[in-house]
Image (spheres, helix red, strand yellow):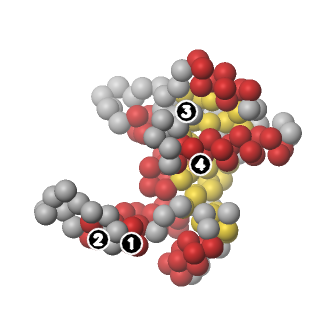
Amino acid sequence: MFLCDEWKSSKGGLSTFNREFAVNLAKTTSGSIKVHCYVSQSDELSREDARRHGVELITARNIPGSVDPRDWLKIPPPELPNPDIVVGHGRKFGTPAFFIVQTAKCKWIQFVHVFCEDLGKFKATQSVAVDTIEENEKKHKSEIELCKAAHVVVAVGSRLQQKYSNCLPHVKVKLE
């Protein structure tokens, strides 16, 4: 079960990566593995498109009092209360993956696609009060905590594999 904010990829990035990964996994397994995407929002067109690609879209339910749709992903879907594997990605979907694994007692694969400490060096900020390097160091620390909690860590690209392998000496970091 992949954790995603949407199927359509209106913003690109993680949504696109997760959708393409789910579609290709469904295609290569020829139905021997059921692939689900647990999304915080979807419409009928998205659900139909996912079905055409062999992926079942499950839409999270709103949590009363929560305005962050990613919070909704922290509760396993009633349609699939005990997935075998949860695929988290970065900080956005690593935290919901952690919550689901605690409840469903399943395995967790955590994907990483950026090295936050490096990213802060190149990001410009609108505000003098924001230190992007310091902010990205905090993000990096969060990524490392999530990776340590996951059962498997997959780095997207050989440079990231090397960087995360250095940060996680006791964790096997796989290359995608």
Camera-side residue: 75 or 18? 18
- Considering the numbered disc 2 on the image, is that residue within a helix, a strand or a loop? helix
Q: Position of residue 92 (x, y in %)?
A: 44, 49
Compared with residue 41, is residue 88 higher up or lower down, i.e. above or below?
below
In this orientation, does residue 60 appear? Answer: yes
Label 1 to label 3: alpha-carbon separation: 29 Å
Marks 1 and 2 close (CB-CB < 8 Å): yes
Q: Position of residue 69 (x, y in %)?
A: 40, 34
Label 3 to label 2: alpha-carbon separation: 32 Å
Q: Which residue is mark 2?
A: 133
In the image, what residue occupies the spot 62% across and 54% down? 108
Q: Nearer the viewer, mark 1 or mark 3?
A: 3
Compared with residue 106, is residue 67 higher up or lower down, i.e. above or below?
above
Among numbered discs 3 and 2, the one appearing first in the sequence = 3
Residue type beneath disc 1:
Glu
- Considering the numbered disc 3 on the image, is that residue within a helix, a strand or a loop? loop
Marks 4 and 1 close (CB-CB < 8 Å): no
Q: Which residue is mark 1?
A: 117
Among numbered discs 1 and 2, the one appearing first in the sequence = 1
Residue type beneath disc 4:
Phe
Q: Which residue is mark 4?
A: 17
Marks 4 and 2 close (CB-CB < 8 Å): no
Q: Which residue is mark 3?
A: 8
- Considering the numbered disc 1 on the image, is that residue within a helix, a strand or a loop? helix
Among numbered discs 4 and 3, the one appearing first in the sequence = 3
Q: Position of residue 145 (x, y in %)?
A: 45, 65
